[in-house]
Image (cartoon, rainbow, N blue to C red):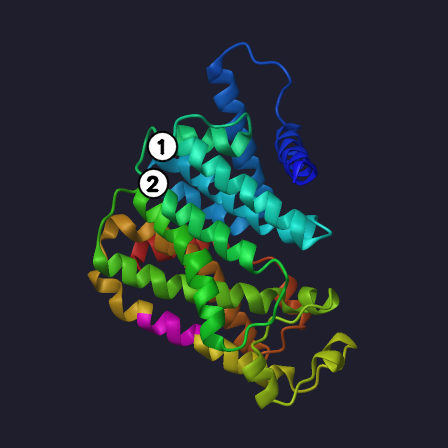
Amino acid sequence: MNCTRTIHRTIQSTIVARSYTKLPRYYSTTLEQTQSALKYCRDSVRQRDYDAYLCVPFYPAQLRNAQYAIRAFNVELASVRENVSKTEIGKMRMQFWKDTIDKVFAGRPPQQPIALALAEALKSCDLSSMWFKRIISERSENLDDHQFMTIKDMETYAENTASSLLYLQLESLGVRDVNADHTISHLGKMMGIATFLRALPFHLSQKRLILPAQVTAKHKLSQEDLFRGHVEGVDDAVFEVATAAYDQLLTARSLLKSVPPAAFPVLLHAVPSIKYLEALEKVDFNVFDTKLQRKDWKLPLTLWNAYRKQEI
């Protein structure tokens, strides 16, 4: 037991140290420390979640640093699976973040840039620790790469991760509205599914299969064949999963007119996923088509037009 606790403390110390290495070693004031933490989050989002980075300027200026902090938190958690060799280590990192969120909301953030930025965000907006912990718990439970059984299971994962992230950003705007909540719930599910489809080629290269078992069985796709590169019939499976994402999008759009305009910056985060699904349809749902790997240089303009028209 003592050995386990020692390992746990060592890993926690390592996480803090690794996260903080990009910050200056010397701080003359707390202000400098906070500014460095905010810069770390902004740079992290720009480098690792560029689509979200493009959406932040549509938020009120005084709330943009909060968006970078929230999104940097999400990026950090999303990267845990790729940065650990064992599930147990991943779960320890997730526990570190659970403890960190508790400390942030208790006013005692650890010397870690994302934690410091989140603590700063709480000074300008109200956020619920519940959404942070829901994201952590869902990602922690899926560190072992188990295959989803049904599309509904995939949607549940997306609700607890992508939708929860959007709920946090909606809270940061001070918007409390049932229609906005419902819209974001459906958009988050769509975004989560689209993210899985976009990552499918990478996951297969890593011997991981995220397409629901119910769908792969229906289309007679075996895990072994897919891992060997035999992808005949995958397009039909992808079409079925993408259709579920479109259904979520259509439901969200049906609610759009009832959503307060103040919530629209959050809804903009769905646009990149919508554009991906549209591009996927153009290539007949071939997720391996190289056209899908190209950066959408029109995305900033697309976001601006969506914001101007209040449409997604």
The first of marks 1 and 2 along the sequence is 1
- Dividing the picture into quarters, in which one does residue 202 lie? bottom right
Crowdedness near tag 1: few (<14), some (14–19) or many (≥20) residues, C-alpha within 10 Å: some
Above or below for 158 versus 217 = above
- Disc 2 residue type? Leu
- State left or right for residue 240 relative to residue 65: right
Query: Where does residue 125 sit, x and y in percent of width and height?
Result: 31, 35
Magenta span of residues: 245-251
Above or below for 21 versus 281 = above
**Which residue corresponds to the image point at 70% horizontal and 69% vertical from the top-left?**
204
Q: Is residue 304 visible?
A: no
Crowdedness near tag 2: few (<14), some (14–19) or many (≥20) residues, C-alpha within 10 Å: many
Q: Main secondary structure of the magenta part?
A: helix
**Which residue corresponds to the image point at 36% horizontal and 56% vertical from the top-left?**
267
- Disc 1 residue type? Leu
**Which residue corresponds to the image point at 38% horizontal and 72% vertical from the top-left?**
248
Above or below for 24 versus 148 = above
**Contact, mark 1 vs mark 2 (Cβ under 8 Å):** yes
Which residue carries the number 1 mark? 122
Q: Quadrant of the C terminus?
A: bottom left
Q: Secondary structure at mark 2?
A: loop
Which residue carries the number 2 mark? 127
Q: Is residue 120 magenta?
A: no
- Dividing the picture into quarters, in which one does residue 141 lie? bottom right
Q: Is residue 246 magenta?
A: yes
Q: Secondary structure at mark 1?
A: loop
